[in-house]
Image (spheres, rainbow, N blue to C red):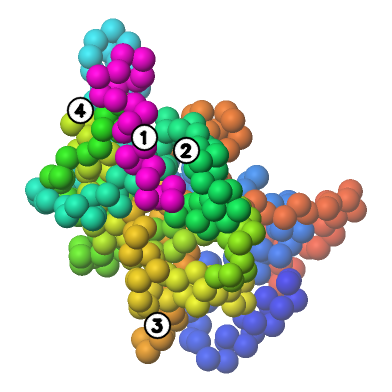
Amino acid sequence: MEEEIVETLCMFERFFPPSFFDIMVHLVVHLGREARLCGPVHFRWMYPFERFMKVLKDFVRNLARPEGCIAEAYLAEECVRFCSQFLKKTTGYEEKPDRNAEYESSSILEGRPISAGTCCVLSEKDMSIVHLAVIQNMTIVEPYVDMHLQHLQDTNEKCRRDATILWRMHSQKFASWLKEQIPISSDHHDETLKWLAYGPRVSSRSYTGYIVNGLRFHTISVDRQSQNSGVLYEATAMCRSSAKDTSQMVDLVTYYGRVLEILLIDYNTFYIPVFRCQWANIGNGVKVEDGFTLVNLNQSQMAYARDPYILASQAKQVFYSRVDESSSWYVAMRGPTRRYREEDAEDGHLDVGPMPAVVAMDVDDLVDESRNARADCEGIYV
């Protein structure tokens, strides 16, 4: 790397004027030797200190007394920070929340909307589809899913022999069966579970923006340069080799899509946010080439007509970059969340990105016999 950098700069001198070769271009010459002697960059980088120097420079209000301005402003900031920490524990004072923070609400189970809502009335078919998607993905209802599957196998011989028929019957009858098992007048079940079993109202609220899991989502109708409508959903699904295959197996499947509509489903005492999405077909709409995942979103949605909804808490954000203007394929790229939680750092689950490779260094590598002083002129002691 050291030799190639020097040769590259020499080739640049054939095309660029001397004014191009300032100190920043010259520093590239030393990168190879610094990596060999010092190891990974993140142990010795100066970016945090340079950013803090920018903060200190902003403290200067009197150019004739820069040091005094920095000292007084730094002391004032320390006092304000101490007071804010003290008041936070003694009074109801709170700092400004993060941009993608979720406000706690007793009516919305998770997340918060960031746009004006509009009332909408879902059809009976859409309401049954979205209600089935909610109750099959809520943790509190999971035991009843297993109970209903076992009930179908015990009462229907076809369901016991064929897994396809079993899941079809489960999708058709689970909502009504759950409502019979958990009546609204029962005192032996949780209130949330009773209202989930009772079912939602026909009217709901629609939004164009929503924050959940530290991510900011917008519908595809919002025309913005920064796209926030891409969504990724990892689901455990029943897979089979063909339509005639009766022996199915459970596997983790990744679905790529875009958010078409954000709905708050009204369950009388609380709201559950759901996303209606446009999904890419798993068979011929998703492929992997050269390590990149390519997604084609301009295909028929008939395969997802009965299941276009997901819970907002299940959505992960993904960004799409078109291969070229004439292509219908997009490169799917996942972005990190902006939310930092201390419990994630303590548990070791914090996403910090890929770390640099480990550099093996010996004692001989620390010895640098190259001369760094010029011999053609008199030096100046600093």
CB contact under 8 Å: marks 2 and 1: yes
Q: Which residue is mark 3?
A: 328
Q: Which residue is mark 4?
A: 269
- Look at the picture and state if 373 lies above or below 340: below
57 magenta-colored: no
Q: Label 3 sits on what residue type? A: Ser
Distance (Cα) linking label 3 and label 2: 42 Å
Distance (Cα) linking label 1 and label 4: 18 Å
Mark 2 or mark 1: whose residue is earlier in sequence:
2
Q: Which residue is mark 1?
A: 178
- Look at the picture and state if 224 lies above or below 79: below
Residue in view at x 47 percent, y 67 percent: 332
Q: Helix, strand, or loop for circle 2?
A: helix
> Residue 256's x, y, as percent?
44, 63
CB contact under 8 Å: marks 1 and 4: no
Q: Quadrant of residue 90?
A: top left
Mark 1 or mark 3: whose residue is earlier in sequence:
1
> Residue 343's x, y, as percent?
51, 28
For the N terminus, the image quarter is: bottom right
> Residue 87's x, y, as percent?
27, 13
- Look at the picture and state if 96 lies above or below 294: above
CB contact under 8 Å: marks 3 and 2: no
| Mark 1 burial class by Cα count in 10 Å: few <14, some 14-19, many 20+ | many
Mark 2 or mark 4: whose residue is earlier in sequence:
2
> What is the magenta range?
169-193
Residue in view at x 30 percent, y 18 percent: 186
Q: Which residue is mark 2?
A: 148
Mark 3 or mark 4: whose residue is earlier in sequence:
4
- In front: 345, or 310? 310
178 magenta-colored: yes
